[in-house]
Amino acid sequence: MSLSAVHGTLSSLKSCQADIGTGMDIVTDVAMDLAETQDQGDNPGIKEMEAMILECAKLDREINHFVDIVQQVTSEVNTQQQPEAMFSLSAKVKEQFTERIARLSDAELQSHPKVVAFMDSMKNSLNQANQESVENTEELDEDIAVTQSQVNFTCPLTQVEMVNPMKNKKCNHHYDEAAILGLIKAKQGQKKKCRCPVVGCGNTDVRQSDLIPDQMLRRKIQSQKRHSSRT
Ligand SMILES: [Zn+2]
């Protein structure tokens, strides 16, 4: 095992992490379907989805810590001078990883951005479903979604309809994921803070950690797309 093999493994772990993220989006989507179509109250399906989301968040967090520890441990050792040091690396990583994982709490998982997005989506879906059952106006609801579209579906950065809308939890503005992450990165490169691109917004420091995927909005955009392709 060489260091380059280690780095190769790390990068495949990271692509695995991207799959976990996609999986979490799908679980959220399914849970929203359940919340919108099933009887409200104690819904065992949604509870199961919630457990799955938390499980994924845990895995995602463990990969982060693992990658972090491997990078730290490998940077401390000079394998050219001491080739035998490779042998102690894995034991060292294992030891530090176990130690770090033991210190983590499950409660922290609630602040994982995709878990936050899940909880948010569930709350919104349940609210919406409750309103619908009171008013029973599904048609009207779709019309509302369409009128809203002219206002909210456009990314302030790309000026086109968002694909993966992210909500800024500080100022509540939305942007498309790729566009805002690109902007934050570009500003970081210039050592500048990223100002919220929405005109008139006072938020002068947009950080990646403030952004939460807005699954509800994403679904609205998608359902409106389906709606307009039908007509
Ligand atoms: Zn803003």
Image (cartoon, grey):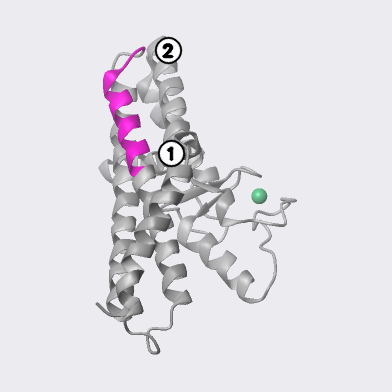
Q: Are marks 2 and 1 in contact (CB under 8 Å)?
A: no
Residue at 63% over, 70% down:
187
Report if residue 158 is visible in the image: no
Residue numbers of the magenta segment: 41-56
Q: Position of residue 90 (x, y in %)?
A: 32, 66
Which mark sits nearer the N-terminus, 2 or 1?
Answer: 1
Q: Is residue 14 above or below residue 113?
A: below
Q: Which residue is denoted by mark 1 in the rendering?
A: 115
For numbered disc 2, what is the local secondary structure? helix
Disc 1 residue type (three-letter)? Val
Report if residue 168 is visible in the image: yes
Mark 2 or mark 1, whichever is nearer to me: 1
**On-image quarter of the C terminus:** top left
Residue at 57% over, 66% down:
183
Q: Position of residue 99 (x, y in %)?
A: 43, 50
Which one is in front, 122 or 230?
Answer: 122
Disc 2 residue type (three-letter)? Glu
**On-image quarter of the N terminus:** bottom left
Q: Position of residue 137 (x, y in %)?
A: 39, 18
In the image, 12: left or right of 208? left
Residue 170: within the magenta? no
Q: Is residue 95 above or below residue 141?
A: below
Count how many numbered circles sit on residues in the image: 2
Residue at 48% over, 36% down:
110
Q: Which residue is denoted by mark 2 in the rendering?
A: 135
